[in-house]
Image (cartoon, grey):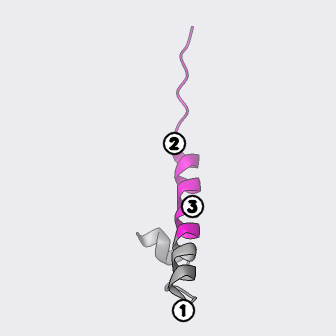
Amino acid sequence: MHCVKLLGQRLMVRDFDRQVAEVQARVAILNGYTALGIPVTRAVG
């Protein structure tokens, strides 16, 4: 959760629907960073 705060300490928009969209964008960014850290395993032989 610390990474979410690094993307912005609080929600910038006031409208609830836009807050939801902002949180979804943050989650997508975090998922992208997580995907970069997952090793790709391949069978040898």
Estimate the spatial distance between the alpha carbons at disc 1 and disc 3, rounded to whole Å.
Answer: 21 Å
- CB under 8 Å between discs 1 and 3: no
x then y, percent, for residue 22: 57, 76
Name the foreground residue: 19 vs 35. Answer: 19
Kindly identify which residue carries mark 3. 28
Looking at the picture, which amino acid does disc 3 mark? Ala
Lower sequence index among marks 1 and 3: 1
x then y, percent, for residue 41: 52, 27
Residue at left offset 54%, top offset 89%: 15
Kindly identify which residue carries mark 2. 38
Check disc 2 and report its element: helix, strand or loop: loop
Looking at the picture, which amino acid does disc 1 mark? Arg
x then y, percent, for residue 6: 52, 76
Residue at left offset 53%, top offset 47%: 37
Residue at left offset 59%, top offset 54%: 32
Lower sequence index among marks 2 and 1: 1
Nearer the observer: mark 2 or 1; the answer is 1
Above or below 42: residue 2: below
- Screen quadrant of the N terminus: bottom left
Residue at left offset 59%, top offset 68%: 25
Dominant SS of magenta comes to helix
Estimate the spatial distance between the alpha carbons at disc 2 and disc 3, rounded to whole Å.
Answer: 16 Å
Of all residues, the one furthest to the top in this rendering is 45
x then y, percent, for residue 23: 52, 73
Kindly identify which residue carries mark 1. 14
When asked about the image quadrant of residue 7, the answer is bottom right
Q: Is the residue marked by circle 3 packed among few (<14), some (14-19), or many (20+) residues within 10 Å?
A: few
Residue 31 is one of the magenta-drawn residues: yes
Q: Give the range drawn in magenta.
A: 24-45
Residue 23 is one of the magenta-drawn residues: no
